[in-house]
Image (cartoon, rainbow, N blue to C red):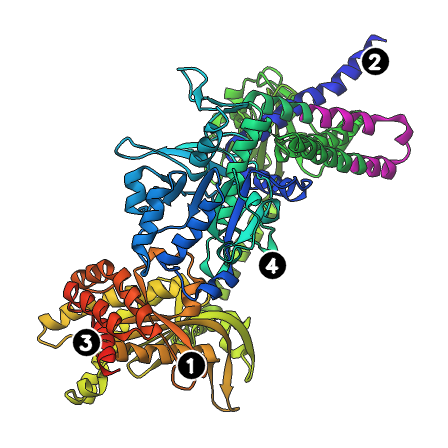
Amino acid sequence: MWLKLRKQVWKWRGVLMTAPTVAAIVISANSAGLFQLLEWATLDLFFRYRPSEPTDPRIVIVTIDENDLTKVGQWPMPDAVLAQLLEKVSAYEPRVIGIDLYRNFRVEPGLERLEEVFESTPNLIGIEKVVGNRVKPPRLLEDLGQVAMADLVLDPDGKIRRSLLSVVTDDEETKLSLSARISLMYLEAEGMALEAVDSNSSHLQLGQAQFIPLEGNEGGYVRADTGGYQIFLNYKGREKNFKTISMTDILNDRISPDLIRDRVVLVGVTAESLNDLFLTPYSAYGNSLKRMPGVVIHANAISQILSAALDGRPFIQVWRDSAEWFWVIFNSLFGATVSYSLLQARIFKNNSSGRWAIFAVWLGLGNLGLLIGGYVAFLNSWWIPIVSPIVALTTSAITIAGYYSRGLQRDSQSQLTQFLEAMPVAIAVLDAKGKPYYTNQKAKELLGKGPVTNAPTQRLSDVYQIYFVGSDRPYPAENLPIVRALQGERTTADDMEIHRPDATIPIEAWGTPIYDDNGNISYAMAAFQDITDRKQVEAERERFTKELFDLNQNLEDALDAELELTDAYGRFVPHEFLYFLGYESIVEVKLGEAVEMEMSILFSDIRDFTTLSEGMTPEDNFKFINSYLSSMEPAIADNNGFIDKYIGDAIMALFSGSADDAVKAGITMLNRLTEYNQGREQSGYLPIHIGIGINTGSLMLGTVGGQKRMDSTVISDAVNLASRIEGLTKNYGVALLIGDRTFCSLKDPNSYNIRHIDRVQVKGKSEIVSVYEVFDADPPAIREGKLITKSIFEEAIQLYNKGSYPEAARFFQKCLRINPEDKVAHIYLERTQSR
């Protein structure tokens, strides 16, 4: 009875050791952030499949969509239109009005009227951008103190899962977010104000809601940047979860006043062309990626605060680290216990396949249960770990399955001795104290004697006559593999030999430590064998290898030549071109193969190159062109592009990534040109000027030609349009122009110095194309002048396009007084005078 109980305790001992070990590993991996992205993805999944919540009756969004833009006829909308919109909204007596529009410039006509609206509407809040590249608010609203920040917090995967309530600027000024400022104004009418829970923490109370700022390791986050005052954003839902009214309906008085009265009104853009869109948990992965307008995200943040303060709707809650650790440990222990019980069940004693099938089913159901449990907790506003407990449960179960298999092996331990005796190699074992414990028959034959029980480890080399190969120097006992195994090392040695009276035997030995269940070394085992035959084979192989080396020398030379050829053709046909066609070698490419891709195309050309080249010899011409092109090439490669072809002094480059790569390459080329011209001037040459045009669109990339001569090329209207846009740089006297497709494809156009130049019908095209100047690489004085006059210039362009030529001329003259070097303003001024 006692023996049976002891056996059962020994079996369950593996379960008790496995579960904490697996839990510790999983907790360490989780603390290192290995599961962070998976936990975020699980949270996003829960958001998308959470039952739809009712529309928040306290919030109304006035949207500016594509139809509204068409009605207005321009963007940004004139100050008069914005003033009219705000007047109409204010007349319906909302409690708070939030304008999610950056308005740090004026758009005539209507500035005076807009400022009157600002002064007469104390419940109106404008926005500014505080973090990163700052965008200032309207000066009048800033003076009135009616400003909040519109900054959003993006996770490393680009999604918004957190809400930023406030930040403290470098000058110690506290800036409230749009959601916080509007919510406080709304709740002030309800008699609620923000209060500190206690003076020793940053916990705040607002009505029924208590705010606890994130510290960086909550939920699935690990060491997140939690600057400012951040909380989880418990989304109300998508745009359909809020009452929306179009700007056109407001302006045309097509709404009931009761829709707006005493509510929060947010005014913001939802038009996709304006690109005020962000990824959220509702943005599914894959080809159906859907982004949410910024104004809807602000509406979610406001709804979260109001619902929490007034209705008691809970914020997203998380466990403490200790609770998460306990959860992981519990699931690890649960997985180990249930797995071992299933595998030990008597009903599967003679049904191995049934045992493992049931094991797989239970493991799947266990993981599914964790996922469902996490979803149910999320429905109750708890974000509990899902990935780490699943990993812990699965790993413990699988580990126990392995432990069970090893247990079956331990049950047949009585057969181990027979197995070792049948081994074709010699086996010797020392106990934990270094005393000889066991040798099989093969070892006795090789050593010439059995275990010498009174021989200490320091004398093993002397007792068994072990020497270095080819010498009479005894092998150091401390370096013997079996002795090193007692120190916990796994070693191999083949530089020893046994000296016997009748023979000298070279041997190879492997030392392995053997541990007990507590991790202590209980034995050291050495396996060794006679390698006389192998030594002879190695000597023969060395001779054969030398002969083979001599025979293959010519083959290596041929391979070197092939590598040089590969590098050479890569300078004529870009490796990227072959990659897009799906080949690794140019010899695989066939005539007529093509692939359709979305790319950005860059054309550049030297101004007045014909005149410049007439003063040079043909040799000087080639030297000049190669010098220039060598200077430009890195600018393209460093920005993820490649040169498709050189056309004399012109460059055609392709960018398969974002449009930003092409624009950054163009700016870099112009900056490198400045450095290049400095070298030319120091050498007594005149500086050169180039024009760059960029367009984005679909193109066909493939091969053209005949059977004896073919070339790589790209064909599409997008390529032709890029060439035409480059030609327009000469007409406007600017260095870098981009098309509207490229402009709309930029991740953040505000990160560049860009201004709209014109809407033109380029040669050979029937459609009207908008072109934009990128002037980041202009000389500092000219660039600063264009930045100062940007709003004036764009206003002048609008007046010109409307046919108000005298008024446009007045604005262009104003630009030129500030920035006389603005060639585009000169051109437009001349156009107005010829009208």
Which residue carries the number 1 mark? 720
Under mark 2, the amino acid is Lys
Residue 140 vertical position relative to residue 12 in the rendered view, above or below: below
Residue hosting label 3: 688
Question: Answer yes or no: do the residues labelled 4 and 2 have beta carbons within 8 Å?
Answer: no
Q: Which of these two is toward me, 136 or 286?
A: 136
Q: CA distance from mark 4 to mark 3?
A: 45 Å
Distance from label 1 to label 2 (Cα)?
87 Å
**Among numbered discs 4 and 1, the one appearing first in the sequence:** 4
Q: Which residues are magenta?
A: 332-360
Q: Quadrant of residue 624?
A: bottom left
Residue 52 x/y as whole percent:
67, 42
Residue carrying label 4: 287
Point out the tag, 4 or 2, that comes first from the N-terminus.
Answer: 2
Residue at 59% of width from left, 38% of height from top? 39
Name the foreground residue: 643 vs 830.
830
Q: Residues within 10 Å of mark 3 (few under 14, many from 20)?
A: some
Q: Amino acid at mark 1?
A: Asn
Q: Amino acid at mark 4?
A: Asn
